[in-house]
Image: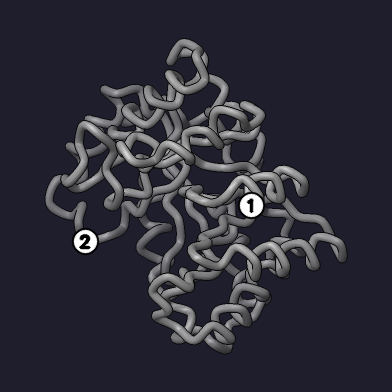
Amino acid sequence: MLVDSHCHLDFNDFEEDFEEILERARANGVTAMLNAGNNIGELSNQLALSEKYPFIYTAAGVHPDNAAEYENLTAEDLLAQTQHKKVVAIGECGLDYYYDNCARDIQIKVFKEHIKAAQESGLPLIIHTREAEEDTMTLLGDAYKEKPFSGEFHCFTGSQELADFGLSIGFYLSASGIITFNKSHELREVFAKLPIERILVETDSPFLAPVPKRGRRNEPSFVLHTAEKLAQIREIPLEKLAQITSDNFYRLFRKASDKGRYDYK
């Protein structure tokens, strides 16, 4: 039993063989998936999948690369989307200073609205942060002091300092296929020391396929390879790692119901 806690199933990459992708996921023990938001203008496409398949959940948000299109986005805009029963989180959202596809002040402005929405809705925040640790910690830390909220760092590739900060405010950290890459020694060290009850697994598909699938289009079934590496790092059986990370998912994303996890029909 595995949960792919972050993927992008509504992307065009999956159009031609979507049903086969789901079957391969089931064959690898994947029982639920969280389809993360990238562009709130396309939320209807995400919801269509969540309404059709009980095991697919949705998060509503704007990726920092798209923040310029939503400079005037408000927390109220996001809260309106959370009324749908399958919207279980806010995001993905955050800061990306690596590509700088959007002015940093606009990224920060839009990120703050997502944080407010998480505070008001009680839904967890899904964080994307790249080359922006200091600003990410400052924004989250200041907001948390005003009104606590829950969340996760998706596809975590950050420093030990960022990991410790996340743990200090009750956040979860999600392992992607990057932990299988040969050069990810420091990242594996971080995940080796994390409290296991704060770890999730994800694909971030169609991106970042893990070894031995690296270089291919990623898909939810490949989360098995990430889980296998993580179980090796933690020195526990795969079955135990799968159970723990799945339990962690439902503890964080409380609006998600495990009743649909085995229903692939």
Spatial CA distance of label 2 from label 1 is 33 Å
Q: Position of residue 15 (x, y in %)?
A: 18, 55
User: Farthest residue toward the right?
Assistant: 146
Residue occupying the point 25% across, 45% down: 218
| Left or right relative to 107: residue 16 | left
| Left or right relative to 231: residue 205 | left
Quarter of the figure with the N terminus: top left
Residue highlighted by disc 2: 12
Residue occupying the point 46% across, 29% down: 261
Secondary structure at badge 2 equals helix
Nearer the observer, 55 or 59: 59
Tell me which corner region of the image, top left, top right, bottom left or bottom right, holds residue 69. bottom left
The vertical placement of 62 against 26, above or below, is below
| Left or right relative to 25: residue 169 | right
Binning the other alpha carbons within 10 Å of mark 2 as few (below 14), some (14 to 19) or many (20 upward) gives: few
Residue highlighted by disc 1: 162
User: Farthest residue toward the top?
Assistant: 237
Residue occupying the point 35% across, 40% down: 177
Give the residue type at disc 2.
Asn
Quarter of the figure with the C terminus: top left
Q: Earlier in the sequence, mark 2 or mark 1?
A: 2
Residue occupying the point 34% across, 34% down: 180
Q: Nearer the viewer, mark 2 or mark 1?
A: 1
The vertical placement of 235 against 51, above or below, is above
User: Farthest residue toward the left?
Assistant: 16
The vertical placement of 158 against 120, above or below, is above
Residue 79 numbered tag: none
Q: Position of residue 224 (x, y in %)?
A: 34, 27
**Residue 51 seen anywhere in this rendered image of the structure:** no
Nearer the observer, 26 or 96: 96
Q: Position of residue 66 (x, y in %)?
A: 42, 77
